[in-house]
Amino acid sequence: MKKQAVVINPKDNVATVVADLSANSTVHFFIDHTEHALTLLEDIPLGHKIAIQEIQAGQDIIKYAESIGAATELIQPGRHVHVHNMESLRGRKDK
């Protein structure tokens, strides 16, 4: 199995893809030493994030075992996670 996405820490709820991937393809990744797979719901560009579990609106997006922002809507596993469905919480004076 060729790894198609990277999960940095078992606490992460997103993975980073290592190639351009098409909707409806199956992506394989490891959490610790356990292989996982899920079907992509949309095209994902190289270097972008995908949800590897359901992320509720307002819930933290976790990468590197740290919050990198919050979901602005429900994000299903296999969906692209980017500026269209998350917002940064760092460097903001209003939050």
Image (cartoon, rainbow, N blue to C red):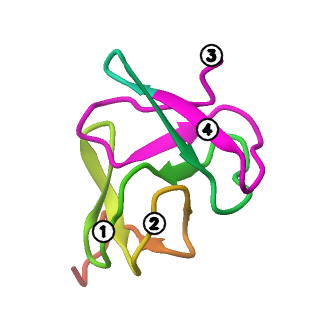
* Residue located beneath label 4 in the image: 27
- Name the quadrant of the C terminus: bottom left
Mark 2 and mark 3: Cα distance apart in space = 24 Å
Query: What's under tag 1, amino acid-wise?
Result: Leu
Taking depth in this image into account, of 12 and 87 the one nearest to the observer is: 12
What span is colored magenta in the figure? Answer: 1-29
User: What residue is rendered at 32% in x and 78% in y?
Assistant: 57
**Residue 73 in picture, x, y percent from top left:** 41, 81
User: SS for tag 2?
Assistant: loop
Query: Which callout, 1 or 2, points at the residue further toward the start of the chain?
Result: 2
Viewer-side residue, 11 vs 52:
52
Judging by the rendered image, the residue that carries numbered circle 1 is: 89
Calculate the distance from the C-alpha at mark 4 to the C-alpha at mark 3. 10 Å
Which residue corresponds to mark 2? 76
Residue 95 on the magenta segment: no
Expressed as whole percent of the image width and height from the top left, the position of residue 59 reads 25, 69
Mark found first going from the N terminus, 2 or 3: 3
